[in-house]
Amino acid sequence: MARRASFDAPETLGLLPDAAVAKHLSRGMQSGQEFPPQVTLRKAGTSLDEGDARWSSEPIRELLEEAMDRFEDRHTDADSWLAPRLHSTLRLTRAEAGDGRLWNHLAMLVAPDYVVWRHKGKEIAESSRFSGPHYTQCFSRLWWAAELFRDGRDYEPVTLACGVQDVLNTTLRLDIIDHRPTAQAFLRVLAALMAAGTPRLGDHVNALSSAINTAGSTLVYDVLAPDSPPLVDELQDWIADAATAKAAPWDRLPDGPDDGRVPPAAVDCLLPLFEKLRSEAPVRRRSRVADEPAAPREVPGLPIQRTGVSLDKVLPPGRG
């Protein structure tokens, strides 16, 4: 039986400023010993349109409670199950998803218990899991992983990406993953490594990510492997259908927006290059193996100033 939150979560999602999180997030909340001050935070935030079914918090709570029950002893495994279902349930444009206030509200007012459950280390869940960059925040990172690694309506690549923590911790941070053929070619190489039973898989993921990122500073992937233009109307229709869409299924993958598959020829064009980069990339053994870091760690050769998919650039109509 799914667990229920022992606090009164708001029925509607909202926007909560970073300053409110910084002011009220305490070590007791990060350790799960107490809940955030609901009344105070609601006053500090802004509720979204109650008449828009997209902003209902109940479907999200149901997903999170199911995840906590299903993966009670395997918390990291929840990521690959939850990411596509969260994306399918919370139907957003990229501009909406780029507003950190939405994710702050979800983490502090709707599901602080999940943040602690998923990210608590020996003592606490780091503050960046409640309010932080889109590649670190508990829910934002999963939504963006689903957005960037899906192949049109197909979420299967997302389960592969989110099943390897180093993809979420390092690869998701890179601007180049915003190019869909690059993302899919990267996953093809990753799948081959997994099929071969490659030891120290995370080290190989980090090395490959660094190599692809470095090569991308001199090679323009979208010129080498052009992507097809997004089907804007189809994406907008999928978002508009949130009011009548069925709940995301638990035992099979949902369908994402039917806004166009990645051209196979573009992926095939990049594969030989990525395989070559993989074979030449130096794999550095980490000094210790951990479940995952509290925040994305620095990888040798990876320029840490790159902050993942650009949230400031001009996006095609419908994408923002």
Image: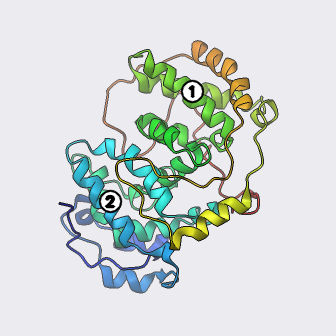
Q: Nearest the camera: 71 or 217? A: 71
Residue 209: x and y, percent? 57, 30
Q: Secondary structure at mark 2?
A: helix
SS category of the residue bearing label 1: helix
Rendered position, 283 above or below 266: above
- Please report the residue visible at 55 percent of the width from the left and 31 percent of the height from the top: 187
Residue 178 position in % (x across, y down): 66, 44
Task: Tell me where residue 9 sits by quadrant.
Answer: bottom left
- Image position, residue 308 (x, y; %): 60, 46
Q: Report the residue at 77% width, 29% height from top.
A: 218
Which residue type carries mark 2?
Leu
Image quadrant of residue 198? top left
The answer to whether any part of residue 124 appears in the image is: no
The label on residue 64 is 2
Amino acid type of the residue tagged 1 in the rendering: Arg
Mark 1: few/some/many CA within 10 Å (<14, 14-19, 20+): some
According to the picture, the residue beneath numbered tag 1 turns out to be 188
* Quadrant that contains the N terminus: bottom left
Question: Which is more toward the observer, 19 or 106?
Answer: 106
The image's mark for residue 119 is none
Q: Residue at x 73, y 31 (%)?
A: 266
